[in-house]
Amino acid sequence: MNLMRLLFLILSCTLNAGGPGALVIVGGGGTPEMVRKHFVELAGGEKARIAVLPQASSRPNRGEASVEVYTKLGVGEVYSVTLDNPKKARALINKATAIWFPGGSQGQLYQELDKAGLVEFVRGRHRAGIPFAGTSAGAAIMSEVMIPNAPEKPGLIGGNTPVTKGLGLVPELIIDQHFIARHRMDRLLSAVMDHPDRIGVGIGEATAIIVRGGNFSVMGKGSVVVIDARKAKISNGKSGKLQSGSNLSLNILKAGQTFQFKGLK
């Protein structure tokens, strides 16, 4: 284990001990092996039982690639959970020591969990201390105020960025993914100005944030953009009108850097 991974593991295990599980939130575009290994360590290493919830994807073999990847990393048990039988799905999720959400459509993922009556149960597993991880759609769904898709037209206009309800595993943050590669600054900025009590976090590809205890640390190859409007002056006009604001805080982070989002209002 290299020094960087050891420091992240110590941070994740000591901050907010006994509280909600750590979150490994990946911006899509491929998950670096060091991030996967860190998640495996959080899950219990060789004794881990990772449940893959692949409902964001519409592929017939959804979940199989994730099972293969984590099996090769030496995880004790990895399995894909279908929701056709909610009682069985609940049992499989309940026995897991960690949960992994692959990519696809975050709106579809939430809808399938909701249809199976598992949304609150999944939240409960996180509150009980189970670590969760996800990439792309699996990252976005961890927000409470969730961006399901792109606006019809770009622009800093009130209500322009569509939002729906996510799992709310880290309700303080609005997560956006593929952030740099897909030029998503305007949609996240607009969403933050619509919801200035939340902090926008745009995660680049092959990059992750590790959330625990009101802080997150960055791992991976790219950048993380943080937009904080909690101390800003936002002129919230009518929906469909131009937005304006002053004194918004902007942070650009890279691997090894941290951000505290609780206790600094």
Image: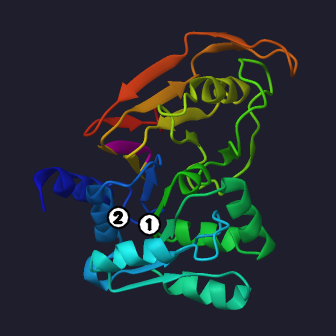
Work out which residue is located at the far front of the displayed protein and give it.
60
In the image, the segment drawn in magenta is 214-218
Q: Residue at x 37, y 72 (%)?
A: 69
Quadrant location of residue 158? top right
Q: Residue at x 47, y 29 (%)?
A: 226
195 left or right, relative to 31: right
Circle 2 SS class? helix
Residue 137 appears at what percent x and percent y? 59, 53
Give the main secondary structure of the magenta stretch.
strand
Residue 157 appears at what percent x and percent y? 77, 18
Looking at the image, do the residues carrying marks 1 and 2 touch, with CB atoms under 8 Å apart?
Answer: yes
* Tag 1: amino acid: Pro
Circle 1 SS class? loop
Of residues 147 and 210, the one nearer the viewer is 147
Residue carrying label 2: 39
Quadrant location of residue 234? top right
Residue 86 appears at what percent x and percent y? 72, 85
Q: Is residue 195 above or below residue 27?
A: above
Q: Is residue 226 above or below residue 147?
A: above
Quadrant location of residue 108? bottom right
Of residues 37 and 30, the one nearer the viewer is 30
Gap between marks 1 and 2 measured at Cα: 8 Å
Residue 3 shows in this picture: yes
Residue carrying label 1: 131
Within 10 Å of disc 2 (Cα), the crowding (few <14, some 14-19, many 20+) is: many
* Tag 2: amino acid: Phe
Q: Is residue 150 above or below residue 5?
A: above
Specify which label sits upstream in the sequence, 1 or 2: 2
Within 10 Å of disc 1 (Cα), the crowding (few <14, some 14-19, many 20+) is: many
